[in-house]
Amino acid sequence: MKDIKVINLGEGIDIVYAETDKFKTSELAVTFLSPLEEKAASANALLFSMLSSTTQEYPTVNAFNKKLAMLYGAKAACSISKLGENQSLTLAVSSLADRFALDGESISSDSFEFLMKMLFEPNVDVNGDFKSADIKREKKLLCEKLDAEYNEKRVYSLRKLEALMFEGEPYAVNRYGSKACIKETESDDLISALECLKKHSKIQITVIGNVDIESVCDTAKKYFSSVDRDYKPPVKAVFKPCATDVKDESEIIEVEQGKLVLGFRIDSECSFETKPELRLFTDVFGGGPYSKLFNNVREKLSLCYYCVARLDRRKSDIIIQCGCEEENMDKAIDEILTQLDDIKNGDFAEEFEAAKMGISDLVMSVLDDSLALCSWYTNQITDDVVITPEESAKHNNAVTSEDIINSAKLLSLDSVFRLVPLKGEK
């Protein structure tokens, strides 16, 4: 793959273009960053659900899908996530690569024009309001997504740990906001949310494939020139270097399997330079089937059904999720801390080599999937430096054992959440 191009279209608006003939599709995505706040997050999530299913010209879901079919079976989607103290909102269109078009058509140019119309020509009535039937439909679907998080107890317990650990911080807000705020959101809130995003947000247009990039740039400029931009940089993540004491909460609920979630603070603001070290440390600690937690807490001692660690580099934390019986939870916590001490003492030679190979393979596999590659670059919207998977793998391979030891010494346990089966029943 050729080197990526970063094209600036104005303050806070960039195009990240990864040119490649490797895929049969072109990926086109527009991502906005908005400060995390419950009411705004709810309105934004509802707004993007609506924008991804209709436009002014194609006002029904059926008509919208027929238009996508005319674009050689293109697909439209929205995705919403949390990146530090910001909500990330993406609208994307996946279309057939231009080289497969009949009569030399530029499918990517047509698809990107359609993507812009999703943003700039939404399905509103003659008064400029979103239609009540559409709002009602998307509210129902969005609330169902929040219900699904509650019903999936692994996700639910993670959200409870986040609320406990990051209490008072914007990060504690769910990426979809809340059901209460979603239900209160009306057309005026959606119109205001859309205008605010276009005016203030950091915006990244991600393009994967071999496309007419000049056409994409011209189309983006045409639409965004109508916006009176007042760019506000992304909110910096709240950083707490270490825990002063351990918060420990339990909830008894009807669930077949208990859940144990631990949150660790990292005494270092994760930077471009430290990211490979912390990522590889996390994999040694609790990543693949070669990790310390998998082999010892799960396999040897059978204290958990699963035990995995995840790094959030923007929040400088590591969260460990376990499926665990109530009677084993304290033992599991003790053993997790023991494995952390072992890493601090340099006992991880086998795990280190396996993790280094596993991470590099995982990173390089991104190059084999156009959607994964698009997500790779979209998720770097908060970063000052955009790097390729090849560069990331190179940084990973340069990490030393001493880097892993130093990373382990940065951790302190902040919060524990236990989801306990009702009356101990399984």
Image: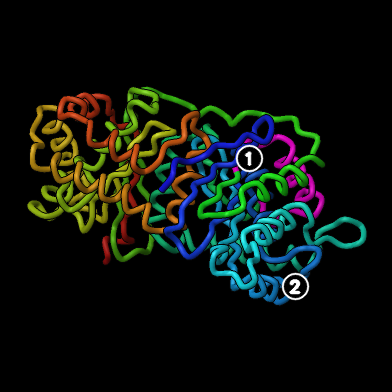
Gap in Å between the C-alphas at discs 1 and 2? Answer: 27 Å
Whole-percent x, y for residue 151 in the image: 45, 63
What residue is disc 2 on? Answer: 60
Q: Residues within 10 Å of mark 1 (few under 14, many from 20)?
A: many
Q: Say which residue appears at 76% left-offset and 63% top-offset.
A: 55
Residue 239, quarter of the rendered image = top left
User: Looking at the picture, does residue 346 appear above or below residue 153?
Assistant: above
The segment highlighted magenta reads 181-204
Specify the principal SS of the magenta part.
Answer: helix
Give the mark nearest the N terminus, 1 or 2. Answer: 2
Q: Amino acid at mark 2?
A: Thr
Instruction: Kindly state the secondary structure of the residue where label 1 is placed.
Output: strand
Could you tell me which residue is drawn at 15 percent across and 44 percent down? Answer: 292
Residue appearing at x 53%, y 54% in the figure: 210
Secondary-structure class at tag 2 = loop
Q: Is residue 244 visible?
A: no
Disc sitting over residue 203 in the figure: 1
195 or 237, which lies in front? 195
User: Residue 110 appears at what percent x and percent y?
Assistant: 68, 61
373 left or right, relative to 130 = left
